[in-house]
Image (cartoon, rainbow, N blue to C red):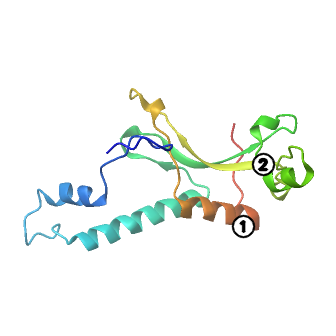
Amino acid sequence: MFFSRGKNRIQNSLNMSDIYKEYISDKEKGSVYHIPSTQFMAMCDMYYEECVEQVLKGKTFKLPFGLGEIEITKRKIPSYKTNDRSVDWKTTVELGKKVYHLNEHTNGYNYGIDWKNVTNCRNTSVYRFIGTRYFKRTLAKLVKSKEQDYYERD
């Protein structure tokens, strides 16, 4: 399906129900592996939640088939590089001049979910990893509460 507006112009037409159909296509009825779709979805959800929890604990998650790694990155932004900083729009409007976030609550570090693409496949530069809302919000909570610290990476 193609939508002409927005960031994501090309939509992925595959979803979990398509994955389930592919999974169940070669399973015989009565087999241990022939499970209902609700159970399949619940198992997938548990697996994904465990992957997110492990990454949030500071571990690196290696994707199958050599598709790379997902990890939390921490990097120091130099104070002179304003184009790498986010604009504090509330203060900017109040003062009438552009003001940047200083990230004082994290000692000037930026944290993010990073997909390290280490594969030899072609055309991987056109793909990007965007974490789910839960993933990003949980990371922000952990960083703000200083419950978890991550290794600094370049």
User: Which residue is rendered at x = 46% and y = 37% of the image?
Assistant: 127
Q: Quadrant of residue 78?
A: top right
Image coordinates for residue 24, horizontal then vertical, percent: 16, 61
Question: Could you tell me if residue 107 is visible in this image?
Answer: no
Image check: 60 left or right of 105? left
Asked if 29 appears above or below 70 in the picture, the reply is below
Q: How many C-alpha atoms fall within 10 Å of the one at disc 1: few (<14), some, or many (≥20)?
A: few
The residue under the point 12% across, 57% down is 25
- Indicate the amino acid at tag 2: Tyr
Q: Is residue 92 visible?
A: yes
Camera-nearest label, 1 or 2: 2
Give, as a three-letter code, the residue at label 1.
Glu
Q: Secondary structure at mark 1?
A: loop
| Residue at (77% x, 35% y) in the render | 83
Q: In this orientation, which residue lies closer to the viewer: 113 or 63?
A: 113
Position of residue 130 measured from the top left corner of the image (x, y, whole percent): 52, 49
For residue 45, the mark is: none
Which is more toward the observer, 96 or 148? 96
> Residue 40: where, in percent of width, then height?
27, 68
Q: From this viewpoint, which residue is outermost toward the right? A: 95
Residue denoted by label 2: 109
